Structure formats: structure tokens, C-alpha cells
Amino acid sequence: MSTTTPHEAVVLIHCPDRPGIVAQVTNCLNDVGGNILDAAQHTDFQSGTFLQRLHVSWPDQAPDVDAVDAALAELRDPLQLNWRIQWSGSLRQVAIFVSREDHCLHDLLLLRRDGQLNCRIAMIVSNHAGLADVARRFDVPFHHTPVAHSGDEQAEAVQRALLDSECIDLIVLARYMQVLSPTFVEAYRDRIINIHHSFLPAFAGGRPYHQAHEKGVKLIGATAHFATANLDDGPIIEQGVTRVTHRDRVEDMIRKGRDIERTVLARAVRWYLEDRVMVHNGRGVVFE
């Protein structure tokens, strides 16, 4: 973890919508020396909820983090305010789960190496041993945890112990071809990002490229979403598509789809690490 003094933070808030929220929150942050660098907001009119992301700096002196939290706490009752602060000096700990395919894994490792992902990839966990050399080349600990079947309690107990040992903040399922148990998913709610190789909600479940080929679709895609107890049904963070034709075989679709998978997953992970993603009423809200 970084030990540098934080001078910037991202503040995520949500509360019932009403006039004056922006003014009260910004005045609150100004009172503790904060300067708003960027602000984005969204109102969900269906539920009457206001959501906002604020990027705040303290240009004159290092902030008193307790004082910032206490100032926001004064708005808890009058605004029914909920908030979360991510300070710039805090580096997220990420675990990548993979099976046999390595294209998404390689992309994430290269982006981290090149400074494009603000995190520490603390481990790679796989139900197969074949990608150990990849982990070694990038100097990332590799853990082979054989899985007898989806939701394997024994395997998941080992995996959870590994995650706890590194205080993992985010789990990325980079083509991890196993279904996690509801207990596992609930333990890391809104902290597991999965890449599914179709444009959800079309072709959920297994062999989506085969399903797409059988239907003769003209577009195929990929979806990055939060994992939930319901397979391929979690809040969507990002999606992408590419065109195919009747000439494309399943193998061609798989090849074309891999390019979309890696870019869609990378964007979703980056946005999560930049605190641009909120989940509200089962939907992903992304402040780009």
C-alpha cells in the first residue's frame, strides 16, 4: 500500500433527489479546504435518487481525512446522504481469476505494467496450471486451485483464504470458466467483474459464439458486468460489438470476439479503479 499523504480523493454520493444537494455538498467540501476538480451527476427519476462523483483536491495543504468524513457526516440526516471516499494514496489490490484462455489476462498485465491501471495485481488464481509461466514473466504470484465443479466449496474456501491474505479489493474474472457459488459472490458483492463473451442479455451461459452462429446474427459482442448469484445477469459496466457475416465460422467469431473481450474488460476495470462505477437498483451507473 502507498504511504504517501493523499492530496486528492474521489467522493461518491447518493441520496434522495431534492433541490440544493450540489450546493450543500460542494460547500461542505470547500469548508474543509477541498477544491472540486471534476463533478458528474445523474438523477434516477424512476426511484427519485441523486448520484454524484466528485474529484476533489486539497491544493494548499494535506487534508485532515477525519475532518472531511466528519463534514460529510453532518449532511447524513438532512440529505439522507450516503457517501464513500477513495483517497489518492490508496492502491487497490486486485486478483485475476483465469482458466485456460490468456488474452484478457495478458492485456490486464500489460496495462498494469505500463501504468495504465492504478492498482497492484496481487495474484492470479486459476483452476488450471497452464498459465503459471505467464504469471512468472510478470512477477505475479500464481495459485493453482483445482475446481471439481462449479461452486466447489473446498476450492472456494482455498480461494477465499488467498484473497483474504492480500486484502483483495477487486476480483476480475478474465475468462474464468467456472460458476461461483452464491455465497462466494455475496462475500464480494459489487467487487467481482466478469467478462462474458456475448452482448448480454443475448446468449447468456455457455458457448455464446456457437449460439450466435446458429442464429445467424450480424453482430457479436462482449459484456463486462458485476457477478451476481444469477449467471450473466449482474449490473452491466461496459459492452462492445463487432460485425460478422454468414461467411464467418464459429472459429472466426471467437477470434473477432477476443479483441472485444479484452478491450471491454480493460475499460470496465479501469473505470472501477477510477471510482467511476456505481450500482443502483441493479443497474451499473458509469461516470465517464
Image (cartoon, rainbow, N blue to C red):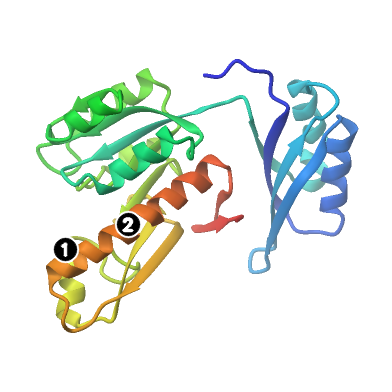
Give 24 or 199, whichever is nearer the viewer.
199
SS at circle 2: helix
Quadrant of the rendered structure where residue 66 is? top right
Residue drawn at the location 20% of the way across and 83% of the way down: 216
Q: Are marks 1 and 2 in contact (CB under 8 Å)?
A: no
Give 98 or 183, whichever is nearer the viewer.
98
Q: Position of residue 266 (x, y in %)?
A: 41, 49
Q: Is residue 233 left or right of residue 42?
A: left
Residue 177 visible to the viewer: yes
Quadrant of the rendered structure where residue 208 is? bottom left
Quadrant of the rendered structure where residue 246 is? bottom left
Tell me the kind of residue under disc 2: Glu
> What residue is pinned by disc 2?
261
Farthest top residue in view: 3
Farthest left residue in view: 148
Q: Position of residue 237 (x, y in %)?
A: 47, 56
Q: Position of residue 280 (x, y in %)?
A: 56, 55
How many discs appear?
Answer: 2
Residue drawn at the location 88% of the way across and 37% of the way down: 30
